[in-house]
Each structure stands twice: as C-alpha cells, then as structure tokens.
Image: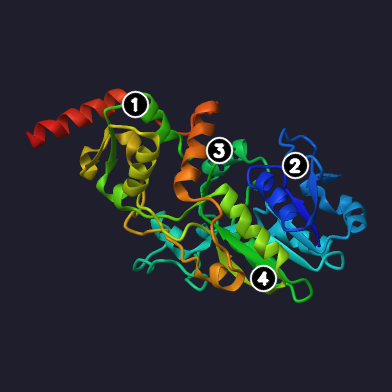
Amino acid sequence: MRILLIGGTGFIGSYLAPELQRLGGEVAVFTRGQSATQRPDNLTRIIGDRRRLRESQAAIRAFAPDVVVDLVLSSGAQANALMDVMRGITGRVVALSSIDVYRACGILHGLEDGPLEPVPLTEDSALRTKLSTYPPAQIAMVQKIYPWVDDDYDKIPVERAVMGDAELPGTVMRLPAVYGPGDPLHRLWPLVKRMDDDRPAILMGEGLAAWRWTRGFVGNVAAAIALAAMSDKAARRVYNVGDARAYSELEWARRVASVVGWPGELVVLPPDDVPEHLRMPGRVEQHWSADTTRIRSELGYAEPVDVDDAIRQTVAWERANPPTIPLAAFDYAAEDAALAAASSRRS
C-alpha cells in the first residue's frame, strides 16, 4: 500500500512514517523541504506548498497513493481543496482532527450555553454549535508554533469536507493532547521545570486539579493513525484517539512526579488562593475525557508504549530541549507567597 503524508515531517509525522513502513507501507511525504526532521531517511519526498496543493497534483498522481493522510488540515477551505485535488488520485483520505470539535470544548471556553456534556465523549457526542472557538490573538500565537494553521482554524468544517464527499471516502482521527519528544507545545515542561528547580511544592486550584482530559503519547497516537490508514475498515469512520484512562491534572502531576522521583508536595488550593498565573479560565467542571473504545474494538488498537515509559522519554527530551519561547508562566515568588499563606491557614 502506498501512503502519502501531507505535513509528514513534523511532530507526529516523524513517528507515523516509520510506523507505516513497519506495517509494510510505501511512504511518501509532501513537504516544503525545510524541516530538520529527517526520520526515517528512506522516504519518497514530494516538494511543494501545502497552500498551493494543486500545483503538485502531477507529482502526487505519479506516486499514485492508495491513501493520503493529511496531518495539517486546519480549515474548511484547506479540506475542500484537498478533496478536490485528491479525487480520482487516491482511494481514501485520512484527516487529523481534534477532540476540540465537541460541544464540551465550547462549554469549557464559555461559548456554549446549557448543561455540561456527559463524559467520556464518544464519537457520537454533540459537536460545538459555534465555530471559531479560539480568538484571533490566540490563533496568531499558535501560528508562531504551527505556521500551517489558517486564520479560520476550525476542525469541524474540516471534518464536514472530508466525511461529506460522496466520491472520495474519508476517515477522521480526533486527537487528544499529544505529548512526547518533539512536542512543539512542551506540555510537560511546566511540571518538569518546577521539579528540576527543586520546588518544594507545585500548586493548582481545586477545579484544575480535578479536571480530566485525554492525553496521548506521540508514538501511540502515530500507531493509531497508522492502523486507520492501513485498514479498509476505517473508511467513512470517525475515531477518538488517546489513552484509555483520562487522568485528572492532579493525578497526572503525581504520575510525572513518581517517574521523575520528585520529593515535593502537590498542593491543591481554593480558587481565590491560586496565584493569577496559575488560574485556568473557563468552566473546568466540564471534562474533556474521550472514549476510545471504537478504535480498539474495530481496528484492534492498543498502546505500544506504556504511560511511565512515555513520560520518561518525554521528560528526557524536555530537559535536553527547553522551550525557546515562553509557553508557560513561572512566578516562584507568587507561588511561595500562596504556599506560605496556605501553610499558615493549616497551622
């Protein structure tokens, strides 16, 4: 089977390409040729611009992919262009989406009225009724990390375009919070830095401490995408991807602390006692835990890397590659003051 990866040299793609090859796929990547990531090095490379996909149509047709996996779709316009170009060239398109399509995301961000969504979220859970969840300033910040993100970022129109094509079957993979070596968002860094700085305590508010969302190690997420790309059973199906267990923020911090061997204390504070830079806006009573039963039962998915090993690999990478731009707020003076006030109240 021939598989073309669009955006296949980035964070997830660098794990997905070798996994597809391990499963027997012949892999090509569509790339601008500017990425430093070269793993593996025995790939066919089609050089082109994702935003001018039609200009590379002849080269893509020459490769004759059975399946196209687009890792960088971010808007309905991009998805419609993809389907237009690939119709008649490939047999199926696999699109990476996000669990932020669910109504639960809108509730968390205060954009959806009404009751909380029941969790875990299944593939049939309600989607957001409002598009453009993230404000322009936040999109602009994300574009500094992910240049491929459109100003009109929203995965719901992406899914509609890919799953609504009568001629070209699609598959949608709704991803969790993906972490691991190479993570551009450095999701473990706020914990790792505090632990490595020998902080006596890590603070979090009651709401955030209890909040659950689904995570996924990048190697495991890539394994799930590879299964869907290689299986005809995945045609016209939507799959949640992620760990079977959705840890609360407090449980996750404890798990990381155990792997790292950090001897400090995790302190949960009432909302008003949490330093400003550690407060999470929104309705944190709305969890983002996703049910991943479908991909496990239909495609036989199981995580190849266990949680502790995944954390261990990620911590080692975070230590060797600290972020070069501020992705998290650190104010140890404010944290010390909040901890001292909490200790005083307990005594």
Q: Given contact means CB atoms under 8 Å apart, are the residues at marks 1 and 3 in contact?
A: no
Q: Which residue is mark 2?
A: 40
Classify the position of the C terminus by image quarter: top left
- Amino acid of disc 3: Met
**Does residue 68 appear left or right of residue 254 in this picture?**
right
Please provide percent x and percent y for residue 279: 32, 41
Q: Which residue is mark 3?
A: 141
**Does residue 38 appear left or right of residue 119 in this picture?**
right
Please provide percent x and percent y for residue 133: 51, 54
- In the depicted view, which residue is nearer to us: 104 or 300? 300
Mark 2, mark 3: which one is toward the viewer? 2
Mark 2, mark 1: which one is toward the viewer? 2
Disc number at residue 234?
Answer: 4
Relative vertical location of residue 332 with respect to residue 205 in this rendering, above or below: above
- Amino acid of disc 1: Asp
Labels 2 and 1: the sequence-earlier one: 2
Q: Determine the residue positioned at 51% across, 59% down.
A: 99
Q: Determine the residue positioned at 61% across, 62% down.
A: 173
Mark 1, mark 4: which one is toward the viewer? 4
**Does residue 160 appear left or right of residue 316 in this picture?**
right
Task: Decide: few, some or many residues near mark 1? Use Cα within 10 Å; few <14, some 14-19, many ≥20.
Answer: few
Relative vertical location of residue 235 with respect to residue 12 in this rendering, above or below: below
Quarter where residue 87 is shown? bottom right
Please provide percent x and percent y for residue 302: 54, 61
Mark 1, mark 3: which one is toward the viewer? 1
- Amino acid of disc 4: Ala
Q: Which residue is mark 1?
A: 331
- Amino acid of disc 2: Pro
| CA distance separating discs 2 and 1 | 40 Å
